[in-house]
Image: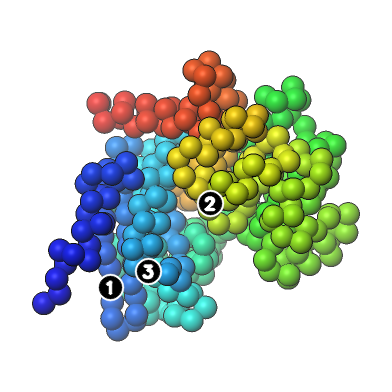
Amino acid sequence: MTDVTSGHVDVLQTLFHSDQGGHEQVVICQDRASGLKAVIALHSTALGPALGGTRFYPYASEADAVADALNLSRGMSYKNALAGLDHGGGKAVIIGDPEKIKSEELLLAYGRFVASLGGRYVTACDVGTYVADMDVVARECRWTTGRSPENGGAGDSSVLTAFGVFQGMRASAQHLWGDPTLRGRKVGVAGVGKVGRHLVEHLLSDGAEVVITDVRAESLRTITDLHPEVTVAADTDALIRTEGLDIYAPCALGGALNDDTVPVLTAKVVCGAANNQLAHPGVEKDLADRSVLYAPDYVVNAGGVIQVADELHGFDFDRCKAKATKIFDTTLEIFARAKADGIPPAAAADRLAEQRMAEARSR
């Protein structure tokens, strides 16, 4: 018999006592036949069934995977609340390198675990999972979104995610410079994969000067072959130090804003698609102290979750785009509340989301 009192005491401490806890349910999943090891975290169902993607990632440890699931699911509660969705927050992580262990059997096993929750959790794509994967998961679980159009889904949600981030940038420009256009502004995009490449298209169409970086050379080539006017920075460190940068858009993994990067940012605005951009509490104040306007990530990157939520009711792209356009107004509302309350925008966004969830619980 395994002694669970020592190895998992930190997890229980986090769940029941820390600020990162407060989750309604955390499910540890294992299917030895397929090699599946997964964590499904439901932070809140106050507004409705928890909705959030499935991340497939080679975590350094199981503890790291649990921590990521907890943080991401909490973020989804806030994101869904401010997106005006009747959904709570959830997230799943599958432990392992998707290039090595992803298989049909593993995805089907994962689908069975999600189905066992009886609709309390609705899953979708995230880092390491794609539309084709959700088609497989859906064979075992009807609470699956992000499927292909051929299988009754809406397809790639990155299109509306990028559109929502673009709306957040327009709102940031309106708040800071009095004009919602990005024309003539220099925008740095770190990560030009699924979301970042669409964001670059919006920026160029609006007349922005764009600088990009990515760890994958092929992603950079895809952009520069189409748009030779786009500049490439050597890496993220070089990008954030770019002279004359107006806006920085982190569109890769989280933790982009930390004790090392914030002091050297040249941009006056941070608005990007990546989740959990603030590496730790207090970074939002560091940004404010440097007069850097931060558009909270879970507000501006909500276009994708708006899309997958709509899929549950019969997908309509125009209806989703209209909802995603409202990210502009929500972002401006957060900036206004932050100014009125004398707090950073991240804190103002949290207050608005918590208010909606509290109102739902009291009904």
Residue 45 located left or right of residue 81: left
Give whichever of 82, 326 is nearer the camera. Answer: 82
Q: CA distance from mark 3 to mark 2?
A: 18 Å
> What amino acid is found at the position of numbered circle 2 in the picture?
Gly
Question: Is there a contact, CB below 8 Å, between mark 1 and mark 3?
Answer: no
- The reply to whether residue 41 is in sight is yes
* Residue 325 lies in quadrant: top right
Vertical comparison of 236 with 262: above or below: below
- Label 1's element? strand
> What amino acid is found at the position of numbered circle 1 in the picture?
Gln
Residue 105 located left or right of residue 251: left
- Label 3's element? loop
Q: Nearer the viewer, mark 1 or mark 3?
A: 3
Q: CA distance from mark 1 to mark 3?
A: 15 Å
Residue at the far bottom: name it: 33
Give whichever of 297, 201 is nearer the camera. Answer: 297
* Residue 288 lies in quadrant: top right
**Residue identified by numbered label 2:** 255
Residue at the far left: name it: 1
Label 2: how many Cα within 10 Å (few below 14, some 14–19, many 20+): some
Identify the residue shown where x is 58% and y is 25%: 335
Question: Could you say where residue 85 lies in the image, as x and y percent from the top left?
Answer: 43, 38
Identify the residue shown where x is 70% and y is 34%: 268
Give whichever of 105, 196 is nearer the camera. Answer: 196
- Per the rendering, the mark at residue 30 is 1
**Residue identified by numbered label 3:** 61
Residue 238 located left or right of residue 250: right
Whichever of labels 2 and 1 marks the residue nearer the N terminus, that label is: 1
Question: Could you say where residue 35 lies in the image, as x and y percent from the top left?
Answer: 34, 80
- Label 2's element? loop
Label 1: how many Cα within 10 Å (few below 14, some 14–19, many 20+): some
- The reply to whether residue 206 is in sight is no
